[in-house]
């Protein structure tokens, strides 16, 4: 689990740097060892083999890519790997970047996506930073309304106050951004990755084993990838991710013996 916890930390940092909502995922493609191009549809996850102008479905089994990695196809559907997920999670042509407020992201990371670490000292510190930003914003908003009551006399002063308020909010957000990079003082909530009530946690235990004795299996690797995606979905406010729940009954995710 140590390596997986490091993966969770890296995921939080990646999400902090750039969080882009997506509406249409790209088709993942790679070159097979024989030079043909393999394409995988993001919606159906069905593989297509391209050779010049001709296309054909790819048979079940393990297929080697030119970079020596492998792709597994079972029942006509690709078992997704991390690179496929990364491709599908990014929009082909993002129009705008909508980033989560850094203070909100800090609280989610440290206190837990479901509040599992809400009693920790690091969570308390994160909430203090968030409260500080909120109090400054609310105080400044009330002050602005009062100043704007007499527009004729205070137009210049109000403009200056708005500028000062924006600068103060930026300072508070910068404090949260710095805190996000300090994984020692503000560590990710470790209980999120091992929540026994999570379908993904149950899937990882099922495929990897209670003592990770099957950690090298393809089923374990795929289950851990789904668990990371669940973390990302929760971070973006999506609580209806059923991939792990569906996978529990999937024949590919065999129980570790």
Image: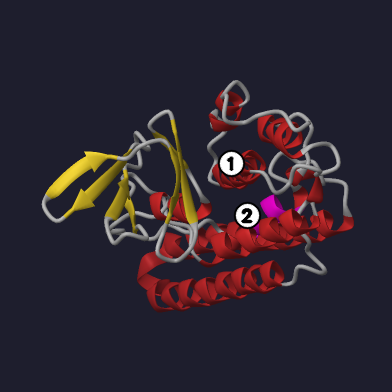
The image quadrant of residue 48 is: top left
Residue displayed at 39% across by 60% down: 97
> For the magenta stretch, what is the residue range?
103-110
Question: In the rendered structure, does residue 108 fall within the stretch colored magenta?
Answer: yes
- Considering the image in quadrants, where does the C terminus appear? top right
Does the image show residue 148?
yes
Q: From the image, give the main secondary structure of the stretch colored magenta.
A: helix
Name the residue tied to disc 1.
Answer: 226
| Residue at disc 2, secondary structure | helix
Position in image of residue 247 (x %, y %): 58, 28
Residue displayed at 56% across by 64% down: 14
Between 143 and 132, the one lying in front of the other is 132
Name the residue tied to disc 2.
Answer: 104
Between 240 and 37, the one lying in front of the other is 37
Q: In the displayed structure, would residue 88 be above or below residue 255?
A: below
Considering every residue shown, the one lying at the far front of the view is 34
Position in image of residue 191 (x %, y %): 80, 44
Which comes sooner in the sequence, label 2 or label 1? 2
Q: Tell how many labels.
A: 2
Residue displayed at 63% across by 54% down: 104
Mark 2 vs mark 1: give the one in front: 1
Question: In the rendered structure, does residue 215 fall within the stretch colored magenta?
Answer: no
């Amino acid at each position: 689990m140590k390596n997986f916890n490091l993966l969770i930390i890296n995921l939080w940092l990646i999400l902090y740097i750039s969080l882009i909502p997506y509406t249409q995922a790209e088709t993942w493609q790679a070159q097979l060892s024989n030079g043909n191009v393999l394409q995988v549809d993001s919606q159906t996850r069905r593989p297509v083999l391209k050779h010049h102008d001709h296309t054909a479905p790819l048979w079940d089994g393990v297929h080697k890519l030119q970079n020596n990695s492998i792709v597994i196809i079972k029942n006509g559907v690709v078992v997704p790997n991390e690179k496929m997920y990364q491709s599908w999670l990014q929009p082909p042509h993002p129009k705008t970047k909508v980033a989560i407020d850094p203070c909100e992201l800090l609280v989610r990371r440290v206190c837990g996506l479901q509040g599992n670490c809400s009693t920790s000292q690091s969570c308390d510190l994160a909430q203090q930073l968030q409260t500080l930003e909120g109090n400054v914003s609310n105080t400044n908003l009330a002050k602005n309304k009062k100043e704007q009551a007499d527009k004729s006399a205070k137009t210049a002063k109000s403009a200056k106050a708005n500028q000062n308020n924006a600068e103060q909010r930026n300072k508070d957000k910068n404090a949260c951004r710095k805190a996000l990079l300090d994984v020692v003082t503000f560590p990710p909530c470790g209980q999120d990755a091992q929540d026994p009530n999570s379908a993904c946690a149950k899937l990882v235990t099922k495929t990897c084993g209670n003592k990770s004795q099957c950690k090298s299996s393809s089923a374990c690797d795929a289950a851990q990838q789904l668990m990371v995606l669940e973390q990302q979905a929760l971070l973006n406010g999506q609580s209806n991710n059923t991939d792990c729940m569906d996978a529990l009954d999937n024949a590919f995710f065999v129980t570790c013996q």
